[in-house]
Image (cartoon, grey):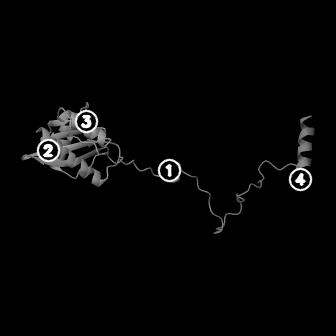
Amino acid sequence: MILTAAAVVVLVRRKGRLPAPSAERNIPGMQKAQNLDYRPGIKPVLPVSPKSIPRQVQKPGVLPRPGDTSVTEGMIDITTSLRTLTEKYSLDQFTIATADGLVFASSGGEDAQDDAARFGEMFANDPLTETPGVVLFGLDHKGSDLVGIIRTNLRIPGDVTSMIERDTKDILNKWI
């Protein structure tokens, strides 16, 4: 029985109906193994890495243009003025710190003391330091060097930063 099956397989292969197990098959894009010479027209197929696929870079959003809200008129204290400033400019938090890292005034929030300690001294040592999500600017009020610490994940255009600085000076002049 086994001999008969083996004989049938041999005969079928000789007639070309079944390929031999080691015979090469025609697979599109594949070269035959015995043809190993250089062929400049044939380009290798390289695997595509996910890192090599270009992705669209998303730019951070920009702060909306502020309204005409006054940050000093009708306010009951400096904290209320600073809260109004954060609402006017769509900021997450705003803190005024001394150069040695103490909170001078804040719009509130749990990070005010940490921000003052971290960024007040950082700005005093290197005013050009950048931290994602934080914008720093210097103020001089009645001979004291202060640091404005803005927390936002949005990009602040230069003219809006100047407007925030002016409003902050107005707040300081009214309350201090």
Residue 98: image quadrant is top left
Q: Which callout, 3 or 1, points to the residue nearer the camera?
A: 3
How far apart, in angstroms, are the residues tagged by discs 2 and 3?
A: 18 Å
Would residue 13 be found to the left or right of residue 88 on screen?
right
Decide: is 103 above or below 11.
above
The first of marks 2 and 4 along the sequence is: 4
Decide: is 41 above or below 129.
below
The answer to whether mark 3 and mark 1 are in CB contact below 8 A is no
The answer to whether mark 4 and mark 3 are in CB contact below 8 A is no
The secondary element bearing badge 2 is classed as strand
The first of marks 1 and 4 along the sequence is: 4
Instruction: Return the residue nearer the eye: 132 or 145.
Output: 145
- Location of the C terminus by quadrant is top left
Would residue 66 be found to the left or right of residue 43 on screen?
left
Q: Which residue is mark 1?
A: 51
Is residue 98 among what the camera can see? no
How far apart, in angstroms, are the residues tagged by discs 2 and 4?
A: 91 Å
User: Residue 101 at what x, y percent from top left?
Assistant: 15, 39
Residue 37: give its label.
Answer: none
In the orientation shown, which residue stands out farthest toward the front? 74
Residue at (22, 53) in percent of width and height? 128
Residue at (77, 50) in percent of width and height? 22
Q: Which callout, 2 or 1, points to the residue nearer the camera?
A: 2
The secondary element bearing badge 4 is classed as loop
Q: Which residue is mark 2?
A: 146
Residue 16: give its label.
Answer: 4
The secondary element bearing badge 3 is classed as helix
Q: Which residue is mark 3?
A: 83
Badge 4 crowding class, 10 Å Cα cut-off, few under 14, some 14 to 19, many 20 or more, is few
How far apart, in angstroms, are the residues tagged by discs 1 and 4?
A: 47 Å
